Amino acid sequence: MRSRDNRRSQRFRSRYGPWALVTGASDGIGKAVAAEIAAQGVNVVLCARRLDRLETIAADLATAHGVQIRVVTADLVQPGGVDQLVQETRHLDIGLVILSAGFATSGPFADAAVTPELEMVCLNVTVVTRLAHTFAQRMVNNGHGGIVLVGSILGRQGVPWVSCYAATKAYVRVLAEGLHQELKTRGIHVLAVEAGPVHTGFEARAGLKYGSAARPEVVAKAVIAALGKRASVIPGVRARLLATSMALLPRRLRVRFLGEVMHRMRAAATSVPPAGSPSDTPRRCPSEL
């Protein structure tokens, strides 16, 4: 068993090493995926805003797996944030990029301040596009690599109360599907991760409350297992069952049903009154960076 695991790790390193980049690495899915990558013997660049968390994670991963870990503290929404990350990694041979940084807003769209919505579009769409493009060019020149775009099963249809967030994740899903087909003949594996509910603290900061959810480690293991084999993955049994059952419904019923679910989740987290009441105000989830 150990020799088989060693061979698997060697193949992983040859395809996606010697360096990987993970955005949103200070918490949740990003942190868990970084640990799985380090366990394969690949060096990791951790990118997030919170230096203290990154330094702790970096020390833990280096000690546990004997790999090199570098830290880049950057706010990717701010002007110059993406350029800083690209500049600080320009001399590294990065063969794998995990784009997991993102945030959500929830609440009535018409009552929301527009700035947080635009910041979410920037991080979840514009930043993802820029980084995917930059590192795809590098990987094409090298003839191999992998890009993982972390999305959500909510991106399969419109979802009231998180309308803008669901729209950004629809973009991520479609972008990943197209890039998977485009780049596979050039040796680059692109994977769309359609995550269901995951316990990361993300939901509480967005003003939501999950009834049941997967652990980030479950998502991370699914990512490593699917990379290079599939165009997309829905990690976790519950999420797959939800996606399968929802696909059987007409689209308009899916939208209505998920809207009701989201409103109940908001109510459970924040004691939200009935929809349309004056205090039914938007909640913003800070960046997972």
Image (cartoon, rainbow, N blue to C red):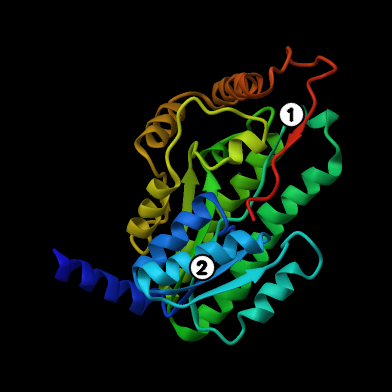
Q: Position of residue 218 (x, y in %)?
A: 38, 46
Q: Amino acid at mark 2?
A: Ala
The relative height of residue 191 versus residue 16 in the rendered view (above or below) is above
Left or right of residue 132, residue 284 in this image:
right
Dividing the image into 4 quarters, which one contains the C terminus?
bottom right
**Which one is earlier in the sequence, the residue at label 1 or at label 2?**
2
Give me the disc on residue 107.
1
Name the image quarter holding residue 257.
top right
Q: Residue at x 36, y 64 (%)?
A: 228
Under tag 2, what secondary structure? helix
Between 156 and 93, the residue placed more toward the observer is 93
Percent coordinates x, y for residue 171 in the rendering: 62, 50
Residue 14 at x, y = what percent?
A: 34, 79
Residue at 47%, 51% (x, y): give it: 193
Q: Is label 1 in contact with label 2 (beta carbons under 8 Å)? A: no
Q: Which residue is mark 2?
A: 58
